[in-house]
Image (cartoon, rainbow, N blue to C red):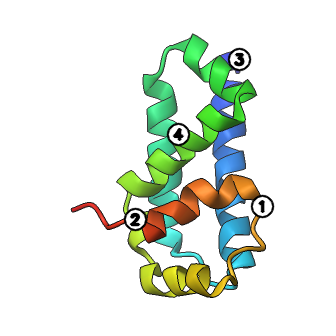
Amino acid sequence: MGAREDITQELRKDFRECLEFFYAQLQLAPPYDSVEKAVGALVAQLKALPAEECQALAVDPNRRWGLYREAFVTTGLNRKHRGIIAGLIRSGRAAGLPRKYQVLLDTYTAPPLE
């Protein structure tokens, strides 16, 4: 495998683990089909990027989480459990997630895009 494929696989694995952690911390069953779509969308996005951009994503957590958020939203994952997660956010029960997950939580408090 080349460096680009290694980065793609590393980010794919990291994204999947982040989604699993996200739902586990919120004590919700992940919507498995939507999680798979989001992971697939992330891989497609990575493959469409220039190699230098993939390298940058590997070392820049802010850029990486921006890409994770994009895959999360474009596949509709942020519409699953929307009411429940918005309620957890309002009640403060989602506050236990690490700060980096705020980019995902914000998608539940913003008006849904049609």
Q: Give the camera-side residue of 15 and 94.
A: 94
**Amino acid, disc 1:** Pro
Q: Which numbered disc flags the more N-terminal residue, 1 or 3?
A: 3
Which quarter of the rendered picture does the N terminus lie within? top right
Q: CA distance from mark 3 to mark 2?
A: 37 Å
Residue highlighted by disc 3? 3
- The answer to whether 81 appears left or right of 5 in the picture is left
Q: Determine contact: label 3, label 2, CB under 8 Å.
A: no
Q: Residue at x 63, y 59 (%)?
A: 102
Q: CA distance from mark 4 to mark 1?
A: 18 Å
Q: Where, by quadrant of the figure, is residue 37 drawn? A: bottom left
Within 10 Å of disc 3 (Cα), the crowding (few <14, some 14-19, many 20+) is few
Q: Where's residue 16, x and y in %?
A: 65, 55
Q: Where's residue 86, x and y in %?
A: 50, 80
Residue highlighted by disc 4? 67
Q: Which numbered disc flags the more N-terminal residue, 3 or 4?
A: 3
> In this picture, is 76 found above or below 85?
above
**Amino acid, disc 4:** Leu
Secondary structure of residue under mark 2: loop
Q: Which numbered disc flags the more N-terminal residue, 4 or 1?
A: 4
**Amino acid, disc 2:** Ala
> In this picture, is 31 found above or below 75?
below
Between marks 2 and 1 in the image, the one whose residue lies nearer the viewer = 2
Within 10 Å of disc 4 (Cα), the crowding (few <14, some 14-19, many 20+) is some
Secondary structure of residue under mark 3: helix
Within 10 Å of disc 2 (Cα), the crowding (few <14, some 14-19, many 20+) is few
Residue highlighted by disc 2? 110
Q: Which numbered disc flags the more N-terminal residue, 3 or 2?
A: 3
